[in-house]
Amino acid sequence: MKGDKLTMNIALIQAYIELGDTEANYDHILEMMTRAVMAEAKPDVIVLPEMWNTGYALDRIKELADPGGRATREVLGAFAKKHGVFVVGGSVAENIGGEIYNTMHIFNREGEQIAKYSKMHLFRLMDEEKFLEAGNQAVTFPLEGGLIAGASICYDIRFPELSRTLALAGAKVLFVPAEWPHPRLHHWKTLLTARAIENQMYVVACNRTGTSGDTSFFGHSMIIDPWGETVASGGEEEAIITGVLDPSLTDAVRGRIPVFEDRRPRMYDIG
């Protein structure tokens, strides 16, 4: 946050994830997060990728998933408090009473958990529905200066109803952790850009990189502004991608093209 004008430095942790090695993944993510906060332009918000604690080791997910999310909350909450940053904790496999969820944990600068979101739309091409339970609640959460953000995970971006619901609830930023693989790079870029343009909001998307089994993940984490312009993006290698959000741009774009004022919700019901 700079001066009287609210802008936020964002750091995306585009990491390689070891399949099923939770100890190595916690250590590696913390190491990359620590490098991010040591940068000259310290981030206000750090964003992690999807399922970073286990990867898609779905055949062992019950034994690997974080019981009650306790380890994740302890590690990320302590980091957020120590370094005075928001942490949008990507997502982890979380065991809640024997049911496994793909869950995002979000922490404020004091290390307090301010929100939690479980992925609503399960991706059949990776057999998620056979091993995971779907979340059932859309989530927004506060950042600073009254700025509201929305949560979405990977496959969720193929469902524009969710991002529109979040925008109508006041979100000006959409965070999207992902494990999005080859060969669908064109879909990734197009869908993220569409969500930004149609909702006149920032989209902040953090994808993993590397290979897991027969699946290759391409990175290309992105920050896209409310005009659909790319603020920052990564390549295919492991990296920390940084950029700046200016929430006043969202207001300017929404004032220039009044999409939300011109909506006709009653006309969208075909009966």
Image (cartoon, helix red, strand yellow):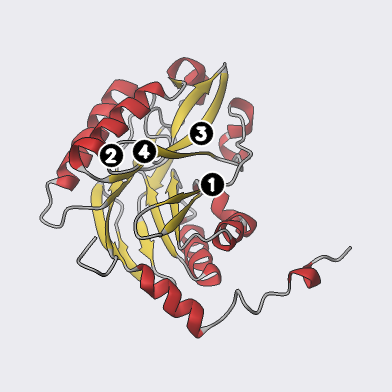
Q: Earlier in the sequence, mark 3 or mark 1?
A: 3
What's the distance in space between the residues labelled 1 and 4, CA to CA?
31 Å
Amino acid on which the number 3 mark rests in the picture: Asn
Query: Which residue corresponds to mark 1?
Result: 139
Could you tell me the amino acid type at mark 2?
Glu
Closer mark to the observer between disc 3 and disc 1: 1
For the point 35% across and 60% down, the residue is: 145
Query: Residue 210 appears at what percent x and percent y?
Result: 33, 41
Q: Compared to 52, does 188 lie above or below?
A: below
Q: Count residues near mark 2 (Cα–Cα under 10 Å), then give few for <14, some for 14-19, many for 20+.
A: some
Q: Is residue 144 above or below residue 127?
A: below
Instruction: From the viewer's perspective, tell me whether residue 40 is left or right of residue 202.
Output: left
Q: Which residue is mark 4?
A: 211
The quarter of the image holding the N terminus is bottom left
Q: Which quarter of the rendering shows the C terminus?
A: bottom right
Pointer 1 or 2: first along the chain: 2
Dot 3 crowding, Cα within 10 Å, few <14, some 14–19, many 20+: many
Label whose residue precedes the other's in the sequence (3 or 2)? 3
Distance from label 3 to label 1 (Cα)? 14 Å
| Residue at image coords 46%, 78% | 253
Residue 147 vs residue 122, the one in the foreground: 147
Q: Looking at the image, which residue is at 50% across and 21% down?
A: 95
| Lower sequence index among marks 1 and 4 | 1
Which mark identifies residue 102? 3
**Between marks 3 and 2, how big is the CA–CA gap?**
24 Å
**Above or below for 177 versus 75:** below
